Structures are given as C-alpha cells and as structure tokens.
Image (cartoon, rainbow, N blue to C red):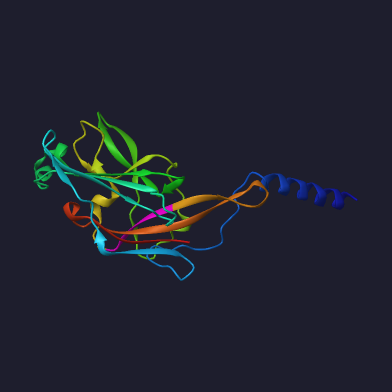
C-alpha cells in the first residue's frame, strides 16, 4: 500500500511539473548543418547591408531584414553603422568603431554570451553580445538566450567612457561563423518547445560583412 501511494504521488508530481516545464526537443541543431526537413535559404550573391552616408553623423548607415521562417514576415532587422575610415579606432578613436545591432521580431531569440569589461578603479561589469558559433557547434544545447522583441548587439564599443571594442564577433578568425537563433512554440499539455536555427555570416571584414545562408528546423 505504501509503495502504491508513493507511485501515485510521483505521477501527480510529474504531471504538475510537465504542465509548467519545457517540452524537451530531442533534435540536435548544429551550426552550418541541415537536412531536407529544415527551412533553408541561401543568398546568391550573399546579402550585404547597403549603407549611405549620413552627413550629420559622418557615418555610413543602413538596415536590412531577414525572414527566418519564410512566412512573409521579417524576423530580424539588421542595423549597420560604419565610419568611412574603419581603421581610426585602432588608433584609440573608439567612437568610430563600427556598430552592428539586430532587432528581434515575432518571438525570435538569439544566443548571447556576456563579456566582461572594466569600469575603472578595480571594478568590472558585464554586457551581453550575440554569440559567435563555429561550424558544427551545437546551437540547440546552448544555455544563454536573449528575450524576444529586443535589440541585441553583434559588435560595438563597450559602454561609454571605456573605449575598447566589444563583442564576440570582433574576434572571429574564420569566414564560416554562425549566429544561433530559436523560436518558441506551444507543446502538449501547456508545455512549450523551441525550433532552433543558424545564420551563416562572414564578418572577417566589418566594412564588408555578408549573410550567406540560414536554416531552421
């Protein structure tokens, strides 16, 4: 009788947890890899954000958009800001460092990772940047994600008055690097799950960054 009550309690407890927990997706999504079941799009030629000179700021600025699940709605708005002389920041002019930000729409989230920076007087703080995945990295098991409907940074200077370039994409060494993203869906019994995907980006040269392809399970 005691064992029966324990089993019954375990069933009730499991049911309660499942109504409020994530319905685990057992698929693995690896950066740069996909099969015929994925949503897939390749840019031919690669997508480059077109910029125009803003005579007020002295920067070249531009935006473009990506429809990640090909449903006719733009899910990612890319904003690019470049100085005509992109090498000035190497001489300490941090305000001229290029900026690339992304507005997330329609519930999409991107993988992020916090980066430490010095606040002076021995103090440090952290700020999140979009993670840079290498080919074959497991996007679906990554643990840090942005909120949806937010603005996230690919690269930029650190917060004001620090004066150093920031962002994981500032240090990439390969043409084949990837942004990880996911989209939340409702599952059985009030659970939820995510579809994961990746965007292939060539960002070795900030002045000539291109988006090559993207895929989503």
156 or 162, which is in the foreground?
A: 156
Residue sticking out furthest to the top: 121
- Residue 164 within the magenta-colored segment of the rendering: no
Q: What is the quadrant of residue 203 in the picture?
A: bottom left
Residue sticking out furthest to the right: 1
Left or right: residue 134 versus residue 53 is: right
Q: What is the quadrant of residue 103 in the picture?
A: top left
Q: Position of residue 36 (x, y in %)?
A: 46, 71
Q: Position of residue 80 (x, y in %)?
A: 23, 45
Left or right: residue 95 versus residue 147 is: left
217 or 13, which is in the foreground?
A: 217
Residue sticking out furthest to the front: 72
Residue sticking out furthest to the bottom: 36
In the displayed structure, 101 sits above or below 123; it is below
At a point 20% along the width and 31% down the height, the residue shown is 161
Q: Position of residue 131 (x, y in %)?
A: 35, 51
- Residue 178 within the magenta-colored segment of the rendering: yes
Which residues, given as a range, are shown in magenta?
Answer: 176-181
At a point 22% along the width and 45% down the height, the residue shown is 62
In the displayed structure, 206 sits above or below 53; it is below
Q: Main secondary structure of the magenta part?
A: strand
68 or 4, which is in the foreground?
A: 68
Left or right: residue 162 versus residue 26 is: left
Q: Position of residue 212 (x, y in %)?
A: 29, 62
Q: In this figure, what is the number of numbered marks?
A: 0
Left or right: residue 210 versus residue 9 is: left
């Amino acid at each position: 009788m005691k064992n029966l009550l324990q089993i019954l309690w375990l069933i009730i407890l499991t049911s309660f947890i499942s109504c409020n927990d994530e319905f685990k997706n057992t698929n693995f999504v690896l950066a740069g890899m996909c099969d015929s079941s994925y949503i897939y799009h390749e840019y031919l030629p690669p997508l480059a954000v077109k910029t125009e000179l803003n005579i007020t700021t002295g920067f070249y600025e531009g935006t473009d958009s990506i429809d990640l699940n090909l449903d006719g709605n733009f899910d990612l708005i890319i904003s690019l800001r470049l100085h005509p002389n992109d090498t000035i920041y190497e001489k300490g002019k941090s305000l001229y460092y290029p900026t690339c930000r992304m507005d997330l729409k329609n519930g999409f989230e991107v993988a992020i990772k916090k980066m430490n920076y010095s606040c002076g007087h021995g103090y440090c703080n952290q700020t999140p940047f979009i993670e840079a995945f290498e080919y074959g990295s497991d996007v679906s098991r990554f643990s840090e994600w942005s909120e949806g409907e937010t603005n996230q940074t690919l690269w930029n200077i650190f917060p004001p008055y620090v004066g150093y370039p920031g962002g994981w994409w500032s240090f990439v060494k390969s043409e084949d690097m990837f942004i990880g993203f996911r989209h939340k869906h409702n599952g059985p019994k009030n659970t939820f799950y995510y579809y994961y995907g990746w965007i292939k980006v060539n960002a070795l040269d900030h002045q000539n960054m291109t988006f090559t392809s993207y895929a989503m399970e």
